Image: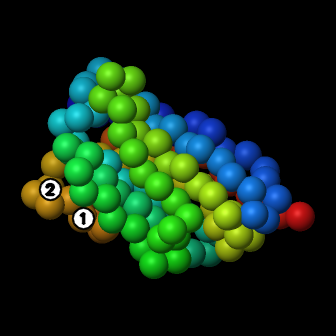
Amino acid sequence: QVQLAESGGGVVQPGGSLKLSCVASGVYIGNYHIGWFRQAPGKERECVARISRSGVAQYYIDDVKGRFTITRRGTQNTVYLQMDALKPEDTAVYFCAATTMVGGSPDPTTYYGWGQGTQVTVSS
C-alpha cells in the first residue's frame, strides 16, 4: 500500500521560490503516476501538476505553467514540485498522491496514498 509524505512548505514573499518533496514509503514510487494538489480554505482540492510513471510526461494547470516544475527521482523514491515566481493566490495546503489509472488523471478521487500535506503561504 503506497503511503506518501510531503515536506518543504513554508512562508515566502511574492516572487519567491519553494521546493516541495513527496517521498514514498514501502513501495517504489516509480510504479505510480503522481499528482501534486492544493487546497485553499473554502476551495476544492485541485491538481496543479502531475507526472507520468516514466517521468516523460508532465501536466500543469494554466495558472502554474511556466512557474512550477514537477520532476521525479526514482533513486530517491521522491517526486518534487519546484515552485517559482510564487503569488499570494498560490497560498494553500499542498498534497501529493498516487494513481495507477491509465494515462493519469487530474481528478483527486482517482488518487490514494495521501499525506498530511504541507502549508505554503505567500505573503509580504
Residue 22 x %, y %: 45, 38
- Scheme of colours in the image: rainbow
Q: Position of residue 93 (x, y in %)?
A: 60, 56
Q: Is residue 79 visible?
A: yes
| Type of amino acid under label 1 | Ser
Between residue 3 and residue 36, name the one nearer to us: 36
Contact (CB < 8 A) between labels 2 and 1?
A: yes
Q: In the figure, is residue 40 to the left or right of 3?
A: right
**Residue at numbered disc 1:** 105
* Number of callouts: 2
Question: Which residue is painted at 39% across and 24% down in the image?
Answer: 76
When the figure is inspected, residue 6 is found, relative to residue 16, above or below; the finding is above
Question: Which residue is label 2 attached to?
Answer: 101
Quarter holding the C terminus is: bottom right
State the image quarter where residue 13 is shown: bottom right
Seen from this angle, which residue lies furthest left?
102
Hey, which residue is sitting farthest bottom in the picture? 62
Residue 33: in sight, yes or no? no
Separation of disc 2 and disc 1 at Cα? Answer: 7 Å
Q: Quadrant of the rendered structure where residue 4 is?
A: top left
